Amino acid sequence: MSLVVMKFGGTSVEDPAAIGRTVDIVAGRVALGKQPVVVVSAMAKVTDQLLRAAAASSQGDRTGALAISSRLRSRHRDTAADLVKNAADCAELVNFIDQKFDSLDEVLRGLSAILELTPRISDLIVSYGERISSRIVATAFRERGIDAAHVDAREVIITDSQFQKAAPLDDMIEKRAAEKLRPLIAQGKVPVMGGFIASNEAGITTTLGRGGSDFTGALVGGALSSESIEIWTDVDGIMTADPRVCPDALRVKVISFEEAAELAYFGAKVLHPATILPAVKKNIPVLVLNSRNAACEGTRITSLAPRCKSPFKSIAVKKKLSIIDVVASRMLMTHGYMKEIFTIFDKHHCPVDMVSTSEVSVSLTVDSNDNLPAIAADLSQLADVKYEGRKALICMVGDDIRGQSGMAAQVFSAIKHINVRMISQGASEINMSFMIDEDDADEAVRSLHAAFFKDPDPAIFDVEARKQ
Ligand code: ADP
Ligand code: ASP
Ligand code: MG
């Protein structure tokens, strides 16, 4: 039987109506003779609220933290009561929810006494979101006659111990998937597990980083060598730009692994940046689909996408970046100088997105983070340092940008009213990116979209939608 991993994001499980749609979609796959394995996120905004509760209690605001927890408890209880009509099943589920919130409250109380939020405790606190949502969804499936089995994702997704951004241990995951998921599948059950959450080899809870449920879906698909990995979200697929910024964005019907990875890395939130890796390893197609519009065919991400007549497929934006200018008093290209600079970023575990050099200066862009003053202090041992926040990176992704003449001229003339701080082109055949002020980002995306998606290739883009 063909196995399909179906991941549903926060908006696809945000309330009883959304969970109802999710149940319909999975029931539809079962009716087609498919064997689904389901991965769900926490209900929409729950992770943010759990993080807020953690921050409040670690700052001594115990009452505020417990109030957030209490509101979340009611939301989950109400959802369970609305979805599960069978009295015994409902009582069991509500009891489970109460137990989890009781233990969360204990952690929050402890934190308000200790007043220190470590990454490890943060992961424990946010894990409640997916632990509870997956249990609710599994019960809702059973209520509708789908033979679902809840699985604690932390017993399957094993990672290293980098809390808040843990790296998966593929061999362990494959072994655990064989032990915990395969027997359920063999019995014809539908395993349901939370995304994002995992544990290290000692069984301590970790997470895969924000938006990490997509990654869980792909890891499970990879471990089980599934036929496809479906990412169900709240938009029709990967679009030519974020539809929240650019309302006339078009659905991209098909895109390559490489292009999708580039878009995800450079800020297209619709996919977690690591999602593509497990799929590429086993050449499993990834489909991005809309749980609010299940009839739409979505975006298919595969190893080879057909050639596209339009120069670009999509525009991504990564905000909250900083630019660091390092100006040396000696020649930059002195042997070993770049190494010294990068050693400092490495020491602070700070990845660099973009680099540009002149004779005596280097500019680098990084995610804005609390370490910047410390990084700048270390760099100032080598050179003069300036850094500036509130920057955004715009990344244009297309088939063969490097091979097309005049492309840079067209891009920059479309945004000639916007000041460009840094440019990167040629490092990859499929990506052209540049840095601007964050406040200009949305306007830049709209101008670029208007310039490059006037006459889109109908083989690649859903131009029909524009006509309607
Ligand atoms: P989920 O909770 O289902 O994981 P996310 O909020 O993480 O959903 O991702 C979906 C959102 O990604 C969309 O609502 C959209 O605003 C945003 N997005 C950003 N760039 C794109 C893009 N190029 N195509 C589609 N959606 C995008
Ligand atoms: N719930 C997690 C988050 O909000 C993971 C996810 O939704 O993918 O980041
Ligand atoms: Mg997401």
Image: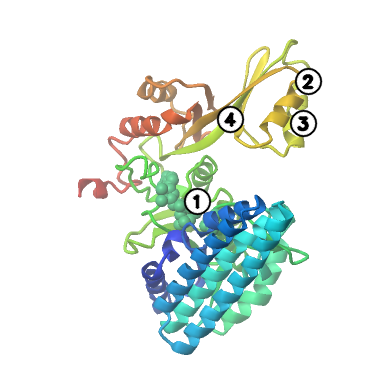
Query: In the rendered structure, which amino acid carries the disc numbered 3?
Result: Thr
Q: Residues within 10 Å of mark 4 (few under 14, many from 20)?
A: many
Kindly report the distance in space between the C-alpha atoms of the residues bearing marks 3 and 4. 18 Å
- The answer to which quarter of the image holds residue 128 is bottom right
Q: What residue is shown with label 2?
A: 381
Q: Which of pointers 1 and 2 lies earlier in the amino acid sequence?
A: 1
What is the C-alpha distance between the residues marked 1 and 3? 30 Å
Dot 4 or dot 1: first in sequence order is 1
Q: Rounded to the nearest whole Å, what is the CA distance between mark 2 and mark 4? A: 20 Å
Q: Nearer the viewer, mark 1 or mark 2?
A: 2
Whether ligand 2 has any atom under 8 Å from the Cβ at mark 2 is answered as: no
Element assignment for label 4:
strand
Q: Is residue 269 left or right of residue 220?
A: left
Q: Nearer the viewer, mark 3 or mark 4?
A: 4
Residue 1 visible in the shown view:
no
Provide the residue designation for mark 4: 322
Q: Are marks 2 and 4 in contact (CB under 8 Å)?
A: no
SS under mark 1: loop
In the picture of the structure, the residue carrying the numbered disc 1 is 271
Residue type at tag 1 = Leu
Q: Nearer the viewer, mark 2 or mark 3?
A: 2
Q: Mark 2 or mark 4, which has the lower sequence index?
A: 4
Q: Residue at horizontal 47%, vertical 34%?
A: 400
Residue of label 3 = 343
Q: Specify which label sits upstream in the sequence, 3 or 4.
A: 4
Query: Quick one: 406 or 234, which is closer to the camera?
Result: 234
